[in-house]
Image (tube, grey):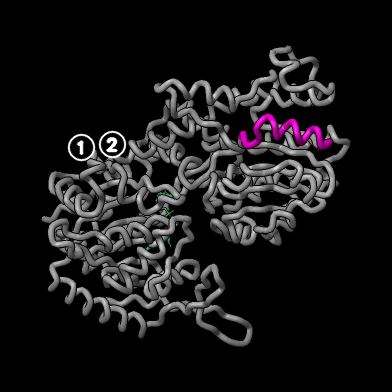
Amino acid sequence: MPLQPEHRSVHTETQSVPAVSVCPAGECFPLPTSADYEREWKRLQKIVREQRLLGREIVVVMGVGFVGAVMAAVVADCVDKTTGLPLKFVIGMQRPSTRSFWKIPYINRGSCPVEAEDPEVAPLIRRCVLEKGTLTATFTYDALSLADVVVVDVQCDYHKETLGNVRQGSADIAALEESLKIIGDKIRPDCLVLIETTVPPGATEYVAYPILRKAFERRGLSGCAPLLAHSFERVMPGRNYVSSIRDFWRVCSGINEESRRRVQSFLSDVINIDQYPLTVLDRPIESETCKIVENAYRATLLAFLHEWSLFSERNGVDLVKIIEAVRVRPTHSNILFPGPGIGGYCLPKDGGLGVWAYQTLMGFEDDIFKITPLAIDINDTRSLHAAGLVRDALRNMGRIVAASRIAVLGASYREDVGDTRYSGSELIVRKLTEMGADVAVHDPYVRHWWEFEKQDVYPSPGSSRSRFFRNQEKLADLRITRDLPEALEGCDAVVLAVRHRAYLQFDPDEIVKMAGSPVAVVDCFGMLDDAKIRRFFELGCEVKGMGRGHIQRIKEEVRAGKSPTDSRGAVSPALDT
Ligand SMILES: NC(=O)c1ccc[n+]([C@@H]2O[C@H](COP(=O)([O-])OP(=O)(O)OC[C@H]3O[C@@H](n4cnc5c(N)ncnc54)[C@H](O)[C@@H]3O)[C@@H](O)[C@H]2O)c1
């Protein structure tokens, strides 16, 4: 079995030091040496021999990132429903890059390599590694040769070249292709390869299958058809992270009859299919398209409300109340208030993967996609409007953004999670900084906002959204505070950017007290009720809100000394900005 020495060195002027991988907490882990590979291979062979004697299926999860780490633990935790004994032994496999290698020693000491709000995640990983002995992690690709099933959970990104034009971008399937090449070189011919990564529709059949087939041919296995399946993840960051993998409906498909049978059998062991039955589709392109359609649908629904949000602001309408009223209809119950930009890892990119696949993998030249890319573009730029409202609110108080200290409350992409990927708040901070503001950020769930702290290299070198704005250099020094009074002290404006539970309890008097004087308040997520809006005005503040045109009416009532009931139903007179 060939070994893979990937011992890289960093050369300084005077010496050569081994490269290290640094975990978020700052601990350094030297990358493996050739001798480590040899030792690791022996360790894995021994464990797998023992596990096979126990009758367990060997599963390699490739890519122990946000999804793969928890999926690996869910698989490692599954048991035979009659005996209660573990069914699988899982090897989490992670390439030993300086960025990600640390995840391997982390898992092997029973620690969780991803930050999750779900209290089940950390104990699940600890239990499987340290108590049940059903989970380990490795850096050697040779682990693949031991697998009965390989689950692929590597990333597949979409790179946008401009802000607000998803068509000027492309899918980055390099990690996926690289992974499949390695898999094709290593796996046994009867091993099932299950792709969970969200891929451009067609990728399993047009990209993965040919790669595996050619690798098999090179290895003299021409008679063996690769066993290849696709089943996408619907995992949701937040307090039900584990449950959103295990106790949730799955869609799956296989490239041929045997692959379909194997993937159903695998998922039936791992997923709670009694309560959440599997949907089996005929071809992988159907399961891939299903993932893209469900995310493009959600993105479209949110983008569509952007124009009604602007309409509401300009015509005295409160979109929050409109949405509540519409939602009463059972057929319209999934209507959502759009926050300041639609983030998370999936919604900003998945529709783009579909458009890209149609043109690139399938080679169509006509332009059938109108709504899907437009929705992403609208969502990607909605947060710039939030920055515009901050400007308008400050102007109404006789101040300008450039001379203001602005507190942004909430950094994550949605409420009560610490996930900051592609959050609307990031663009609010970037735009206000471009306009000259001094920005402070508070979030109870986020310790490090890597999009700023490591903006030169995160999410990858050259891909930071800093490139779409000027004056961003100093944002590398931006540090999130969990101390609200510290964030608010001396600020001119407060941006309520995320509906975190704690923020819904805010008392206007407290906010003004912490700020030290009346402030401009911008509500981006329908967080302030009318009583709070009124109170802010009574305290001498200015208030604006995305989709909340009725605020002007409350302002006029307060200025006229009227109670809320006096002017109910009155048509709003001329508005200031
Ligand atoms: N994060 C979510 O909320 C979410 C939800 C649903 C679906 N998904 C999908 O799941 C997939 C994975 O997303 P993620 O959030 O876990 O990404 P991630 O970036 O956190 O993890 C990917 C991991 O794969 C590793 N990797 C890349 N190439 C490798 C290789 N050749 N060998 C071994 N490891 C390799 C990376 O180092 C990284 O640790 C994506 O397709 C994503 O769209 C994510």
Tag 2, which secondary structure? Answer: helix
Which residue is pictured at 68% across the width and 60% down the height? Answer: 479
Task: Please rate how many residues cluster around mark 2, counting C-alpha atoms within 10 Å: few if below 14, some from 14 to 19, many from 20.
Answer: some
Of 217 and 409, nearer the camera is 409
**Which residue carries the number 1 mark?**
282
User: Quadrant for ligand 1?
Assistant: bottom left
Residue sitting farthest toward the bottom = 14
Residue 251, horizontal then vertical, whole percent: 27, 41
Label 1, label 2: how many angstroms apart (C-alpha)? 7 Å
Taking the magenta stretch, the answer to whether it contains residue 532 is yes
Would you name the residue on which mark 2 appears? Answer: 286
In terms of depth relative to the viewer, which is nearer, 483 or 424?
Answer: 483
Residue at 61 percent across and 81 percent down: it is 12
Q: Which residues are magenta?
A: 526-540
Q: Position of residue 114 (x, y in %)?
A: 46, 61
How far across and how far down the image is residue 81, in percent?
16, 56
Q: Nearer the viewer, residue 95 or 6?
A: 95
Which residue is located at x 22 percent, y 50 percent? 267
Q: Which image quarter: residue 71? A: bottom left
In reply to whether residue 340 is colored magenta, the answer given is no
